């Protein structure tokens, strides 16, 4: 082994001193993980407020919302949202949630904090590059936020930014000037940050595992973070040039995505020869793996947490890892299912539909493994385990609607309706968020040294679990009735009778949103007043529980861990306790 | 007590499945990612080319293709000098390694200079990102400048990295592994050119 | 807690499913007014039954197992699911695999019938243009020929939505331009769709048909309406601030009424 096998430990032989080094420009993966998580928290609160504004407008389209005019005089004269401002808020809601919450928190947040610890390393393979990846991501966020405050406001083309609407510039509408360019720039910067992060995760998982931590003994969360990094490496690599080409179309007069002869606002556009479908191919080649980047860490986290509260191993652990890997692999073959009616060759719809349906198989296996694991268990009901069980339920709900949309003959009716909105919110906006909640309640004690309040947590869970079903289940019905999505108001004949359903959803959304404030309060309150956490409050087995709470700067206090066990030895017959930690050398006679 | 992962303490850690240092692994991953980026841009080029009935093929043998061939020769030679640099560094011959690194750096800079000269020639003829002086598809200019521009950016970045590496090898700041890592990057840049040259130049020869 | 989870999940499952089943006329598929519509509806219903069954089963099983777990005492020795992971893998591959194959096989035929077959030769050709934020429709007129399209000649103010050039283009002189899509019932219709600015989409719920209209492309779409009446055509691809209002009416008339209407339109040119 050469002298440069791993640099990680070599960087942090002494603890950092000074406020800046410790908390701001830190190379410690734990601090970076918390920074990412904090960014995710800020982003989700902004994204949630945006959703409230959207839902209020959809339920009552002439409603005057106090304060809205201050945020945007042009977008909400007299505090009443204009249709274009609705679309802008919707665009920002989607962009913030997908990138800065769902790609950020379960992956960059928890992954940065716990991957090195779970493999037994003192830090990530490249701590300085790790620090850089956070600051790049934060820069990306700030550039995006700037779009709220520039003339014209945020873009209105959706988080999918289809060309030519996104590419022709100001002529296409408010927000399509500087706002859209800032969007493109922000996302391009985000891609760079993600790529840097992926390099770190991959190198750390492969090279920095401590003695005895073979790949087979890795926890599910580490496997998921590792596989997600590999997917991200190739997905963000396509979004980056796509955004650059979009920016070129907008600012340098190119026509990658803009065909000839467009007349916008009575003006003939000077572009020629480009293809709007090219943007869609590039975007969705990234976009589909992206949604799996959002859900796979969630699957890993939930699978990691459940055994600790069932006091039994998960059914079929190797099969589960195989499912995660095969979902990741298949995710590259299905992007066209977002484009069934896009104008691309209809024959390719059939080709894309098959792998899309095939992904159902590993997803079903994983779901059955969870349900089968709960069979015959005695569950310790904590907020963390409740959110894991809730995850399984909403993952089923979201997955089932996907089964409809995967078939082109059905998609011809359901495309661009609220059925799609219901589907992706269930899997991303609910399931992945549930995993973030589960991870928070589970790991916060380890990260800050204090337990979160369980009573508040359970209230949070129940309100949220019932609330999300009240919000998103009715959207399926709306979709089946043909309720089109991305509409600022419902003026069509067939939509007017559906408005009461929207009002119901809005009320549910506001109540559920309010319940999240319980979570935020719990986080902050517990940080300072929560009971002190022991090193292993959940009696769990993986390496993060075999070090101090919170872990010292080099994770294990100078000790070199040796791993003797696989990751989920709960309830082993004949063992000295009902769990065997990974570092324990105990051998149990098996019959 | 110091934590020392690696640095010869192989018994304290699991073997890396690929048996290579993390820096090299990261560079391979970066190369994989960057290859996908170039593939995306080349895909865009191909998609637009196939969809344009009036695609131009303006490259005459002299000067365009000939220039391209010389540039290709220069870049391939720089690949050889890079190999020599890596071999020298591995064998501990630091001075020779430094010299070969400088040679690679100079050849890379020569490639970039020839490329920029060619760009100037095209621009003088009226080619722009959005303009085709021959009256055909304007996508030609967009594809040409963006694909070659992306590659040129990588070449310039590589030239800078090579210079830093040459200086650092001499001063002892960088070691043979760092040279190898730079070599992986440089060979990748070379490899991309071997796609760009046929797809952009040869396919659009008159 | 476990019992509560089981109960709540069961209620959620049953209520959700009940609304799907006892939906009334409000939250459901509109009337099927298209020749290919029954294929789409059939596919939808088959999928609904299959996935509805799996939805109810899996949620109730989850709820049941969680309920059971809560009545066990501390120190309970856990049970492993009989057979371990293998039945899960087999069940998923076989059950889902069969469903996928069946649905794909039938579904591709439905899809191909709409999008991969050419319009019948006697189909009535109609030109459709989408633009921010309206649809316009064009009939070939007495000469049976469509005039050429010239984007530089588009002038909404004077009603030249398509950019026709009747002065220099004979075929354009008798083209009939309308803001509603009027068609005869039970007659194949062949649309050619194009956009003047950004991507729009053509969606008629009752026809069970949807197709994006992409600038730079001429997109064919064909169907046969089987019921007379008035239906809404709405835009489903985000096209700007007026997206939510962008619509037109599809009027399906009897053959006689349509012929009369068309004669009137042609006379007015």
Image: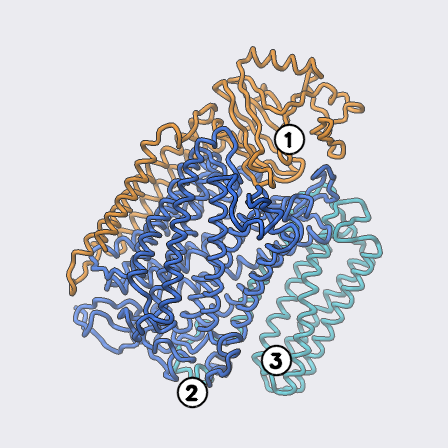
Chain colours: A blue, B cyan, C orange
Q: Return the residue nearer the eye: C100 or A119.
A: A119
- Tell me the mark number nearer the camera, choosing from 3 and 2: 2
Position of residue A296 measured from the top left corner of the image (x, y, whole percent): 41, 58
Position of residue B203 measured from the top left corner of the image (x, y, whole percent): 71, 52
**Left or right of residue A215: residue B131:** right
The residue positioned farthest toward the right in the image shown: B124
- Mark 1 surroundings within 10 Å by alpha-carbon count, few (fewer than 14), some (14 through 19), many (20 or more): many
Q: Return the residue nearer the eye: B77 or B105.
A: B105
* Residue of label 1: C129
The number of numbered discs placed on residues in the rendered structure image is: 3
Question: Mark 3 to mark 2: distance in Å?
Answer: 34 Å
* Residue of label 2: B2
Q: Return the residue nearer the eye: A95 or B93.
A: A95
Q: Residue B65 has which mark?
A: none
Question: Mark 3 to mark 1: distance in Å?
Answer: 66 Å
Q: Is residue C169 visible?
A: yes
Q: Which residue lies at the image location 72% right of the left edge and 27% below the top edge?
A: C160
Q: Chain of mark 3?
A: B
């Amino acid at each position: 082994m050469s002298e440069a096998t791993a640099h990680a430990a070599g960087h942090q032989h002494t603890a950092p001193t000074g406020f800046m080094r410790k908390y701001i420009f830190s190379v410690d993966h734990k601090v970076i993980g918390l920074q990412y998580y904090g960014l995710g928290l800020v982003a989700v609160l902004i994204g949630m407020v945006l959703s409230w504004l959207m839902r209020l407008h959809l339920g009552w389209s002439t409603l005057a919302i106090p304060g809205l005019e201050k945020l945007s005089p042009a977008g909400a004269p007299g505090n009443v949202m204009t249709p274009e401002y609705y679309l802008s808020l919707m665009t920002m809601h989607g962009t913030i949630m997908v990138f800065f919450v769902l790609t950020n928190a379960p992956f960059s947040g928890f992954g940065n904090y716990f991957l090195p610890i779970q493999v037994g390393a003192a830090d990530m393979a490249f701590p300085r590059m790790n620090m850089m990846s956070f600051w790049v991501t934060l820069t990306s966020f700030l550039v995006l936020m700037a779009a709220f405050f520039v003339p014209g406001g945020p873009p209105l083309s959706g988080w999918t930014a289809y060309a030519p609407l996104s590419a022709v510039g100001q002529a296409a509408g408010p927000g399509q000037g500087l706002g859209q360019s800032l969007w493109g720039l922000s996302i391009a910067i985000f891609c760079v940050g993600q790529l840097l992060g992926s390099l770190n995760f991959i190198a750390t998982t492969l090279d920095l595992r401590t003695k005895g931590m073979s790949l087979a003994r890795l926890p599910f969360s580490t496997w998921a973070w590792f596989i997600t990094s590999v997917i991200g490496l190739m997905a963000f690599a396509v979004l980056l040039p796509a955004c650059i080409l979009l920016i070129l179309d907008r600012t340098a007069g190119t026509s990658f995505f803009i065909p000839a002869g467009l007349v916008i606002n009575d003006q003939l556009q000077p572009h020629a020869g480009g293809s709007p479908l090219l943007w869609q191919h590039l975007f969705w080649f990234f976009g589909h793996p992206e949604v799996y980047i959002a859900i796979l860490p969630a699957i890993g986290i939930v699978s990691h947490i459940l055994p600790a509260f069932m006091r039994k191993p998960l059914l079929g652990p190797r099969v589960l890892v195989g499912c995660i890997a095969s979902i990741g692999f298949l995710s590259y073959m299905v992007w066209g299912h977002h484009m069934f009616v896009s104008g691309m060759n209809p024959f390719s719809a059939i080709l894309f539909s098959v792998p899309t349906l095939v992904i159902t198989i590993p997803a079903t296996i994983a779901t059955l493994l969870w349900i089968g694991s709960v069979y015959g268990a005695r569950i310790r009901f904590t907020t963390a385990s409740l959110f894991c069980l809730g995850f399984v339920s909403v993952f089923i709900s979201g997955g089932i609607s996907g089964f409809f949309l995967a078939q082109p003959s059905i998609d011809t009716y359901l495309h661009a309706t609220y059925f799609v909105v219901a589907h992706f919110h269930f899997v991303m906006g609910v399931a992945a968020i549930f995993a973030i909640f589960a991870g928070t309640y589970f790991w916060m004690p380890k990260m800050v040294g204090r337990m979160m309040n369980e009573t508040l947590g359970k209230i949070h869970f129940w309100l949220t679990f019932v609330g999300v079903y009240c919000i998103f289940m009715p959207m399926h019905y709306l979709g089946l009735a043909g309720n089109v999505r991305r509409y600022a108001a419902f003026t069509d004949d067939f939509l007017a009778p559906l408005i009461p359903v929207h009002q119901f959803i809005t009320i549910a959304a506001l109540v559920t949103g309010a319940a999240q404030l319980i979570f935020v309060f719990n986080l902050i309150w517990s940080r300072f007043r929560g009971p002190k956490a022991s090193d292993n409050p959940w009696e769990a087995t993986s390496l993060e529980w075999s070090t101090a709470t919170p872990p010292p700067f080099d994770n294990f206090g100078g000790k070199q861990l040796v791993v003797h066990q696989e990751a989920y030895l709960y309830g082993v017959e004949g063992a000295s306790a009902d769990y065997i930690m990974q570092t324990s050398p105990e051998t149990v006679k098996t019959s | 007590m110091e934590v020392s992962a690696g640095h010869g303490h192989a018994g304290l850690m699991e073997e890396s499945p690929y048996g290579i240092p993390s820096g090299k692994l990261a560079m391979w991953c970066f190369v994989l990612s960057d290859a996908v980026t170039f593939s995306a841009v080349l895909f865009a080029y191909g998609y637009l080319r196939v969809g344009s009935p009036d695609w131009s093929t303006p490259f005459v043998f002299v000067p365009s293709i000939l220039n391209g061939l010389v540039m290709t020769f220069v870049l391939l030679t720089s690949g050889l000098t890079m190999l020599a640099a890596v071999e020298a560094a591995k064998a501990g011959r630091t001075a020779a390694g430094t010299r070969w690194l400088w040679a690679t750096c100079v050849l890379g800079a020569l490639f970039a200079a020839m490329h920029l000269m060619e760009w100037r020639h095209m621009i003088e003829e009226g080619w722009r990102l959005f303009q085709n002086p021959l009256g055909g598809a304007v996508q030609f200019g967009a594809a040409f400048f963006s694909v070659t521009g992306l590659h040129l950016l990588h070449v310039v970045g590589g030239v800078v990295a090579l210079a830093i590496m040459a200086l650092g090898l001499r001063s002892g700041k960088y070691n043979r592994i760092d040279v190898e890592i730079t070599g992986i990057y440089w060979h990748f840049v070379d490899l991309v050119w071997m796609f760009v040259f046929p797809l952009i130049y040869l396919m659009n020869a008159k | 807690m476990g019992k509560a989870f089981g109960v709540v999940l069961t209620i959620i499952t049953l209520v959700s499913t009940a609304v799907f089943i006892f939906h009334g006329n409000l939250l459901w598929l509109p009337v099927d007014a298209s020749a290919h519509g029954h294929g789409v509806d059939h596919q939808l219903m088959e999928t609904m039954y299959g996935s509805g069954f799996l939805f109810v089963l899996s949620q109730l099983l989850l709820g049941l197992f969680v309920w059971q777990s809560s009545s066990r005492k501390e120190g309970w020795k856990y049970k492993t699911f009989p057979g371990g992971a293998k039945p899960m893998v087999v069940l998923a591959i076989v059950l889902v695999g069969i469903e996928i194959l069946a649905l794909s096989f039938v579904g591709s035929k439905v899809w191909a019938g709409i999008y991969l077959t050419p319009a019948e030769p006697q189909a009535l050709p109609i030109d459709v243009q989408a633009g921010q934020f309206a649809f316009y429709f064009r009939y070939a007129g007495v000469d049976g020929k469509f005039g050429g399209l010239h984007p530089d000649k588009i002038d909404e103010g004077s009603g030249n939505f398509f950019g026709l050039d009747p002065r220099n283009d004979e075929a354009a002189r008798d083209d009939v331009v309308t803001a509603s899509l009027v068609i005869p019932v039970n007659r194949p219709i062949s649309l050619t769709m194009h956009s003047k600015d950004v991507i729009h989409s053509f969606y008629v719920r009752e026809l069970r048909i949807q197709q994006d209209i992409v600038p730079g492309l001429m997109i064919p779409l064909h169907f046969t309406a089987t019921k007379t009446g008035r239906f809404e055509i709405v835009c489903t691809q985000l096209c700007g601030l007026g997206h939510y209002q962008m619509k037109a009416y599809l009027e399906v008339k009897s053959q006689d009424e349509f012929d009369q209407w068309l004669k009137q339109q042609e006379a007015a040119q």
